[in-house]
Amino acid sequence: MPTRSIRIGTKEVRWGLGIVVAIPALLVVLVLAINATDVPLSDAAQAALRVPPPPPPSERNGYVDSLGLAAPDGMSAYEAGLKALAADPKAEPWKRRTIGEQMPSCWREESACLRLASASAVLRSVLESERVFLDRYRAMQAKPEFVDLWPAADSPNDAISGYQDFLNGLRLSLADAAVLFNAGDRGRAIAIVQREQAFFRRMAVGSRSLIQQMIAFAGISRTELFAAELARRLSIGDKALWQKLEGALQPLSAVELDVTGALRFEHAQGVKFRQTRRFVRFSDATYEAFAMMGTPRTRHWSDALWPYLYRPRYNTNHYVARTDLLLKAGAVPAADFLRTVDALTAQADALLPAEWVRWFVNPVGWDHEYLGSRVGETDYIGRSHGLAAMQALVRLQVRLRAEGARDPDLVRRAIAGPLGKEFHNPFDGRPALFDETLEAIGFEVPARFLLAGVRLSTGATWAAGGKVWLKL
């Protein structure tokens, strides 16, 4: 077969070389333009950085003791907590406490506290072996304040205050209450519920960081579900105990439910991070964390370019403008929350420039996992309303059982009357739902506004189809 030669003329060569040279040249121009034309930090962004510093450590503040719950024997929790605050935040001065596998979790129906307390032959010995730890936990709770003192992060990779010891204390405390209740000492068991509720409410008010606020909410929710478990076992004749249980479950106040202070603290750290180009690149520690979570990643070839394709103050100003809008949802009652969040989100999105403009003026930053202008802050506000809804369900369940409303017809009549109005769904003002087949009461609540312990099916409490249910 005859061969056919392909001739490439001088013109084609010049075009090819021109394209090869033009692409990096355009990239250089883009990088120079992005770096040379950043804007000043807005007044709103500067204001967002001004958050009150934490108060100095005090023996009245149980937070200090919470950092030393797992300290060696012979060292007070307060002394150990002071050492932890003074140490490098990335270093733990001692290992965290590990509660053995024999300890009940009290999260699922098959491992409910009362049932496991009666079935576990080793629970009493576990509690006795952890008595020093539990005494420290309760001494911490007895202090009149609980204000978060952990220093603000300087990097997205900085360690946060550890709460595992803290949650272990709650597990031990509820298990101890279950043992007491099953042994007939029901007054002391309910007193533990009162103490846990009072403590976590105090913790919620003293929260400066979002993680502490969510841990406080989780503690309130977990203790409420335990109270519902007690209510299923109390006899109608124990009037004094019913009054004591209802007294432990008073409605959360607006101050206790307010998360905007903690969100503004997180907001200030986000503003600080967004002004630093190096945070655009994930750290090695972040990639290690991805691997530990079962989602390993590798660095993209373009990773080294990211800091140069990012306009720090431009991106920060947009982030602040959008977030300030969204945080207005914190002042909105639950009944108007969903509608208001939709309107505020639309307004926040309208602040974004067109897609092609975003690519040219700030190629990296808009959707970046560290630095993107996220709107998830409103979900945390929604969880405060979801917690109030869960508490209303528990209080309704306690009242129904205290009044002996077991028969389905009695339950329906009670919900249709004054009780239904008193314990209504905060999101829509409607009385509780009742499902005779499930033997449960419920509310319509978006799942994203429920804490993880409620979203998960627990047998006595579960979420499905946009509704949350509580076993009567």
Image (spheres, rainbow, N blue to C red):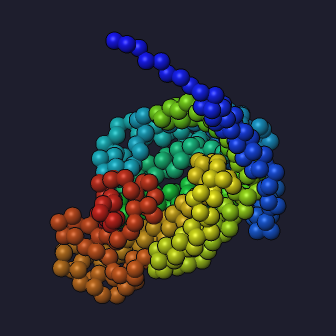
Question: Where is 387 relative to 211, above or below?
Answer: below
How many marks do you count on the picture? 0
Give residue 96's quadrant in the image.
top right
Viewer-proximal residue among 240 and 470: 470
Q: Position of residue 81 (x, y in %)?
A: 73, 44
Residue that appears at 52% across and 50% down:
170
Tell me the quarter of the image containing the C terminus.
Answer: bottom left
Tell me the quarter of the image containing the N terminus.
Answer: top left
The residue lying furthest to the top in this view is 1
Residue that appears at 56% across and 62% down:
375
The residue lying furthest to the bottom in this view is 418
Residue 472, visible in the rendered structure: yes
Q: Position of residue 213 (x, y in %)?
A: 60, 59
Give residue 10's quadrant in the image.
top right
Q: Position of residue 41 (x, y in %)?
A: 80, 61
Viewer-proximal residue among 398 and 213: 213
Residue that appears at 31% across and 42% down:
119
